[in-house]
Image (tube, rainbow, N blue to C red):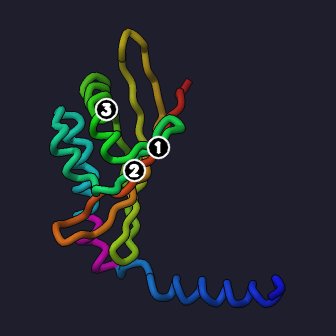
Amino acid sequence: MNAMRIAPITCGLSFLLLAACPLASATETESEIAAISATVEGFHAALSAGNAQAAAKLLAPDAVVMEGGETQTRSAYVAHHLLEDIKFAKAVPTRRGKTDVKVAGDVAWASSSSVTQGMYQSKALNLMGAELMVLTRTSTGWQIRAIHWSSRSSK
């Protein structure tokens, strides 16, 4: 089969997939956005409060956390890096911007930016950050499936 024949088929399949998974309606989205935002905010609140168990409970069993050029499984993150994130969140104030939430069926993504300023391990920090979380609806509510964090100096 040549590329000229494959392209229309691929485009047609893409259209069908998008049509089968439209973004949620405005009415449905309002309640879903509140639930999704509560999950994201709950995760950050658990970090700031030093509650590793509450933070871990919001992560799906197959969740991945991407930060600093590394990808960690949920189990690796909970066993090691989660405690470091708690220590950092408790020590350095972060101002989070508005979370933008998009919903497509049982999948949602929440993105936000932040400013982190303060001292950590005797170093002055002034960072601009970006966060993307992918969540899925489960029988018990929304769970975080993936987190991607990035930051840079705001000098």
Contact between labelled residues 1 and 2, with CB atoms less than 8 Å apart: yes
- Rendering coords of residue 3 (x, y %): 81, 82
* Quadrant where the C terminus is found in the figure: top right
* Quadrant where the N terminus is found in the figure: bottom right
Which amino acid lies under the numbered mark 3 shown in the image of this protein?
His
In the displayed structure, would residue 136 be above or below residue 112? below
> Where residue 71 is drawn, which disc sits there?
1
The quarter holding residue 78 reads top left
Q: Nearer the viewer, residue 40 or 28?
A: 40
Of mark 2 and mark 3, the one earlier in the sequence is: 2
Residue tagged 2: 64
Which amino acid lies under the numbered mark 2 shown in the image of this protein?
Val
Magenta part of the chain: 26-33
In the displayed structure, would residue 67 be above or below residue 153? below
Which amino acid lies under the numbered mark 1 shown in the image of this protein?
Thr
Badge 3: how crowded within 10 Å, few (<14), some, or many (20+)?
A: few
In the displayed structure, would residue 24 be above or below residue 136? below
Q: Is residue 131 magenta?
A: no
Mark 3 vs mark 1, CA separation in Å: 13 Å
Mark 2 vs mark 3, CA separation in Å: 13 Å
Mark 2 vs mark 1, CA separation in Å: 7 Å
Residue tagged 3: 80
- Rendering coords of residue 124 (x, y %): 42, 15
Q: Nearer the viewer, residue 2 or 8?
A: 2
Of mark 2 and mark 1, the one earlier in the sequence is: 2
- At x 38%, y 9%, the residue is 122
- At x 27%, y 22%, the residue is 91
Of mark 3 and mark 1, the one earlier in the sequence is: 1
Q: Is residue 28 magenta?
A: yes
Magenta span main SS: helix
Q: Secondary structure at mark 3?
A: helix
